[in-house]
Amino acid sequence: MGWYIARRLVLSLPILLGITIILFAILQLSPGDPLGVYAANPNLSPEVRAQIIAHYGLDKPIPIQYLNWLEGLARGDWGTSFLENRPVSQVVMDRLPVTLRIMGLSFLLGTLVAIPLGIVSAILRGSRVGGFIGPATLIGMSIPPFFSGLVLIIVFGVKLDWFPFVYSSDPAGSGLSGFANQARQLVLPLLVLGLYQIGIMTRFVRAAMLDVLHHDYIRTGRAKGLPERAVILNHGFRNALIPIVTLIALNIPALFTGAIIVEHLFAIPGIGRLLVNSVLVSDYMVVMAIVFVVAVLTLLSNLIADVINARLDPRTAIT
């Protein structure tokens, strides 16, 4: 298993390198001026502007700029944000915990709800319960997060005034009161991301369970007199876990995409909102850092999924 993990890590390095090369080229070819934030300053002379360009190395050829960025990345120096005039690492790390909290909690909500719903939907297919779960999850995965977010804001934030719809980094109150206020303002964002995840994962779990329930070992387990719960969970669900784990790993980029929308809807100061703002002002160093962090998280989640699948079915570790 150790050799399998090491091999997967080695194979991930050229993928990361390819992602950075493609992204750097796209950002360099895109319209916009990285120093546009200084354009509104009437006291900035052409000589000073040239010095700033030389200071950041923007006067060098694009391949040299990329190699300089890669060298700085290896040293832990992600560059300087043109917009905030701070190290990019500080800018990203200040906002990363907020996004990870929202992504993690919505992922946990979606997983804990979708897996039981998918199993029940597969077992009770053809019944009223199964007939209700199917269309409900289809609606959940069909409604885009920006629309469901607006509906939740209007209904529960404006009309009923149950939950705040503008995120506060420092909610009022201390102790349990502050924790309760923090939890209340996370309800709507988590529902927006969670409902979408529940819709996708429930249908996938249902399909995976329906596939294994027709196998011979399920009929053999029932013929041996095993309890139905043991047949479903120990034999059916265990074998259905391999595609389910893979889907969960592939959902990480979708979670981040949804986080971008949610952070804009609820004014959450996370890296999703920072990414959009950085693209608008051509703050390329921040964009590169954020995409690199997301790529690393995606590759790590896929590695964890491969390791879990190898534990569930050792034959997958051979390929």
Image (spheres, rainbow, N blue to C red):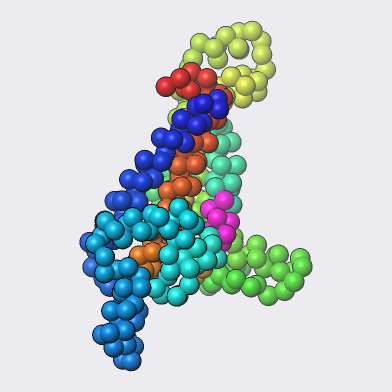
Pick the quarter of the image with the C terminus: top left
Horizontal and vertical percent for residue 93?
Answer: 54, 62
Could you tell me what secondary structure mostly forms the magenta stretch? helix
Note whether residue 103 is visible.
yes
Q: Residue furthest right?
A: 175
Q: Residue furthest bottom?
A: 43
Tell me if 84 is positioned left or right of 107 in this view: left
**Figure check: 285 above or below 49:** above
Nearer the observer, 281 or 77: 77
Residue 33 lies in the magenta-colored region: no
Please report the residue visible at 74 percent of the width from the left and 69 percent of the height from the top. 177
Please report the residue visible at 44 percent of the width from the left and 61 percent of the height from the top. 78
Q: In which quarter of the image is residue 236?
A: top right
Horizontal and vertical percent for residue 40?
Answer: 32, 86
Horizontal and vertical percent for residue 156?
Answer: 55, 66
Nearer the observer, 8 or 268: 8
Tell me if 127 is positioned left or right of 17 in this view: right
Tell me if 261 is positioned left or right of 213 in this view: left
Note whether residue 139 is visible.
no
Horizontal and vertical percent for residue 271?
Answer: 47, 62
**Figure check: 164 above or below 76:** below
Q: Quadrant of residue 72?
A: bottom left
Please report the residue visible at 55 percent of the width from the left and 25 percent of the height from the top. 1
Please report the residue visible at 54 percent of the width from the left and 12 percent of the height from the top. 217
Total marks shown come to 0
Region in magenta: 97-104
